[in-house]
Amino acid sequence: MTSATCCTGLRWSVGQRPTGAALVLTLITLLAGCAAGGKTMTPEETQKDALALLDHTTTSTDLDWSSPGDPVSKECSEGVRYQYMVHAPVTSEQTELADSLAEFWRSKGLQVERSQQEFGAKYGTVYAATAKADNKAGAAFEITNANALVYVNSQCVAGSPDDEQQPWRR
């Protein structure tokens, strides 16, 4: 008997009639997987995607950012996510920098949520934001009166934070 496979890996025998429930499940899976490209990113691809967002973010400002170094791997719902962090001394008005970064992320299709809180004379008002979108790297910033921190998180991919096959652990 001949069988067929869709892009999600579902198999059925040709000539075999699927039940109504099986047909609905197959259609939902096709719409969710195949219509979305049916492509799963590798850990390396998610890291490159996150680093690209980080690079574009830092070059959108005139600050002297640190090097991101190796990512921190964190457990997530489907496996592992990679986080990069950079910092820079603040040389511009905090609110202008916060506005600029938030607008930049919105221009990249990310949904941005902002907040601010007063921390007294030592840190002043701390401006913060998170930026997220489905199937994209996300980001966050914290800006004090002296420093700016930017974090970028990759998409969640299959794997483990303890995986010894990570490129920076070789």
Image (spheres, helix red, strand yellow):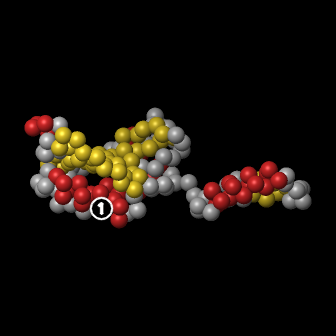
* Viewer-side residue, 70 vs 58: 58
Residue in the picture at 63% in, 56% down: 32
Q: Residue 36, image x and y in percent?
A: 59, 61
Q: Categorize mark 1 by other alpha carbons within 10 Å: few (<14), some (14-19), many (20+).
A: few
Residue at the outermost bottom position:
107
* Viewer-side residue, 15 vs 90: 90
Asked whether residue 115 is in view, the answer is yes
Locate the C terminus and report the quarter of the image it occupies: top left
Q: Secondary structure at mark 1?
A: helix
Q: Residue 76, image x and y in percent?
A: 48, 39
Residue in the picture at 82% in, 57% down: 3
Residue at the outermost top position:
162
Locate the N terminus and report the quarter of the image it occupies: bottom right
Residue in the picture at 51% in, 52% down: 42
Question: Which three-letter amino acid code belongs to the residue tagged 1?
Answer: Glu
Q: Residue 109, image x and y in percent?
A: 40, 62
Q: Which residue is mark 1?
A: 103
Q: Residue 90, image x and y in percent?
A: 14, 51
